[in-house]
Amino acid sequence: MLLIDPVRMLPSLVLPLVGVLFFGGFSSRSFLWAALGVLGTVVFAVVRWATFSYLIAGDRMEIKRSLISRSIRTIPLERIRGVDISTPPMHRLLGLAVLKLDTGASGGDEQEGELDGVTLAEAERLKAVLLRNRATAARPAAAPDAAEEGAPRQDAERVIIRVPRRWLLYGPLSGAYLLTPFALAGGAIGLAFQWGEQLGLGRDAAWSAGQWLWGHPWLLLIAAVVLVVAMPLVGGVMYTVFNWDFTLRERDGYLVAERGLINRRSVSLEAGRVRGYEIADALAERWAGVVRVWAIVTGLGDSQTRGQLLPDVPRGVATQVTDAAIGPFTTPLRPHPPAARERRLFRAIAPWAGVALASSVAAVTIGSGVWWTLAVIALLLAGAGVPLGLDRYRSLGHAYDGVRLSVRSGSLRRSQAVFERRAVVGWRIRQTWFQRRAGVVTLVAGVGAGEGGYSALDVSNAQAVAFPAEVTPDWIAPFLSPSAERPPVL
């Protein structure tokens, strides 16, 4: 850790150190100050390492820090929902790991627990101890003679799926990874501006560079083409780095997902708290027949990262995994009213139609060909909005099979959530002014897991009443029957 902490702080120290050397004229004194700055980071790492400790005592875990002020964080073992082990590159070289405890807190690491720099063997030992404690508390006590009779162990490990490496070719289909080249280019430009300020290259130099590029538009065109061509390549590489050798196991009552090439990460989800799953696919993924899957787990913080069950895999494989974990859901989704279709068509067409109309008026008034070009492009986009709006409407739906309920929405990124009836903790009906005009509402099923609630968008008023009454009749009946005794209003 005395090596990792200074290296980790290096990016934040580079600019100040360069500034000290630059403004000091690269003299011996400036080099002395830079060396003192590096030494200060090492001293900080020593003090931080020497004042940190952890302890498992009885039914609790204590994490002690006394860098500036003494603090003791106590975490009851029964509150631990999962254990996350990651090995960043520097940690892996030194045989270390970062262990994070998921206690269902809504905050970051400081609200939960993190052990940064334990040995990999110690991290695996702690993980086994903490998860076995949870599993033992959750399981009823076995008969004393069961183990003696050679009964099968309940904590045997079983590999549910190991994603083949050839499926990594699906990575570029994910829209998030495709934008990686543009994110890298934007970060490089921002870093250049920041370095420019530190090195004395101010706005005048940036303005001159911008004018030069404006005078050579073919360079901008080449850069744009290079970024577009690099999208599938760079996106595929990033996807491979994050999802290399993705393996989903069942171990000691937990679902354990392991992935990563550079930073190997292991996330454990308590199987007894899994209440459902969410399947998502972008437009390109839908054409290829692949989906991504997240678990809906009660009390899980950061579910979009920790709750991932599967990366891009064929839909049939994802269905097999989710059916085994939650149970099959084959009930067809119920369509939403025609007003929902009209709203989606209007939102997909009207903005571009408005741009086309404004551009046409500007072209007639000003007489510039640029405005005519913009009008034609806007009309083409408005025409493309027709199939997009229809697809968004076809994606809408909700259903209930007596045990599980499901809601689905989206087109460019379609998402369907399937969760158990027992996960529902409440209902909320939301209606905007435009929805009131159209006679539709948004029905939100409150769930103490995942995103906290899943919405059936633009259902009719009758559906907004009938669906909750079907899923939770005991809750809704007092409000529907005039003769029923209603609870007092407080």
Image (cartoon, rainbow, N blue to C red):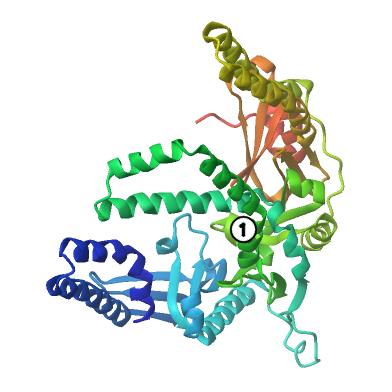
- Depth check: 162 or 326 in front? 162
Q: Position of residue 47 (x, y in %)?
A: 26, 79
- Depth check: 330 or 230 in front? 230
Decide if residue 297 is on the left or right side of residue 91: right
Image quadrant in which the N terminus is located: bottom left
Decide if residue 359 is on the left or right side of residue 406: left
Decide if residue 100 is on the left or right side of residue 148: left
Q: Position of residue 188 (x, y in %)?
A: 44, 53
Q: Quadrant of residue 167?
A: bottom right
Instruction: Find disc 1 in the rendering and name its residue.
Output: 234
Q: Residue at x 31, y 65 (%)?
A: 14
| Residue 228 in the image: above or below residue 56 | above
SS of the residue under disc 1: helix
Q: Residue at x 76, y 93 (%)?
A: 148
Q: Is residue 229 visible?
A: yes
Q: Residue furthest top?
A: 365
Q: Residue furthest left?
A: 29
Q: Residue at x 40, y 70 (%)?
A: 74
Q: Residue at x 71, y 52 (%)?
A: 173
- Depth check: 344 or 475 in front? 344
Q: Position of residue 391 (x, y in %)?
A: 78, 33
- Depth check: 78 or 120 in front? 120
Amino acid under disc 1? Val
Q: Is residue 449 visible?
A: no
